[in-house]
Image: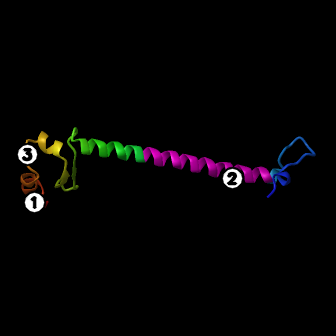
Amino acid sequence: MPCSTWRNNLGPNFFAPGRIAVLKVLASQAAISLDNSRLYRELQNGEAEILRLVDANIVGIFIWELEGQILEANDAFLRIRGIQSVKIFCQVACGGRI
């Protein structure tokens, strides 16, 4: 739609009332899209930071089931707990599963 059909040059209102409603919907959708983009970028940055912590082995991290069984642990967690190898850890904590 050409831009000239959106204008109303006859009165003080630049846009016709029907067009204002359309513009409000478009502006709302644009705002939602920008906000979703920002949230997704923040999520990606947060995930990257967590992966850096896990991979750096600075922080001991483990994942467990609600019943208490540990499913995974990084090297820092094993070191903090004084466990020498993943194999020994799995025999004790994971029921022998690796």
Mark 2 vs 1: CB contact within 8 A: no
Looking at the image, is mark 2 or mark 3 nearer the viewer? 3
Relative horizontal placement of residue 14, taking residue 27 as reference (left or right)? right
Q: Secondary structure at mark 3?
A: loop
| Residue 89 image position (x, y, % from top left) | 9, 52
Q: Secondary structure at mark 1?
A: loop
Quadrant occupied by the C terminus? bottom left
Mark 3 vs 1: CB contact within 8 A: no
Amino acid type assigned to the residue bearing label 2 in the image: Val
Q: Main secondary structure of the magenta part?
A: helix
**What number of labels is visible?**
3
Give me the disc on residue 65: none
Give me the disc on residue 25: 2
Relative horizontal placement of residue 94, taking residue 31 as reference (left or right)? left
Give me the disc on residue 95: 1
| Residue 76 image position (x, y, % from top left) | 17, 42
Q: Which residues are magenta?
A: 19-43
| Residue 41 image position (x, y, % from top left) | 46, 46
| Foreground residue among 49 and 17 | 49
Query: Residue at point 36% right, 45% down?
Result: 48
Amino acid type assigned to the residue bearing label 1 in the image: Gly
Q: What residue sits right under mark 3 in the picture?
A: 83
Query: Residue at point 8% right, 45% down?
Result: 83
| Foreground residue among 71 and 56 | 56
Quadrant occupied by the N terminus? bottom right
Calculate the distance from the C-alpha at mark 3 to the C-alpha at mark 1: 15 Å
| Residue 23 image position (x, y, % from top left) | 73, 50
Name which quarter of the figure residue 97 lies in: bottom left
Query: Which badge, 2 or 1, comes first in the chain's sequence?
Result: 2
Calculate the distance from the C-alpha at mark 2 to the C-alpha at mark 1: 57 Å
Looking at the image, is mark 3 or mark 1 nearer the viewer? 3
Q: Residues within 10 Å of mark 1 (few under 14, many from 20)?
A: few
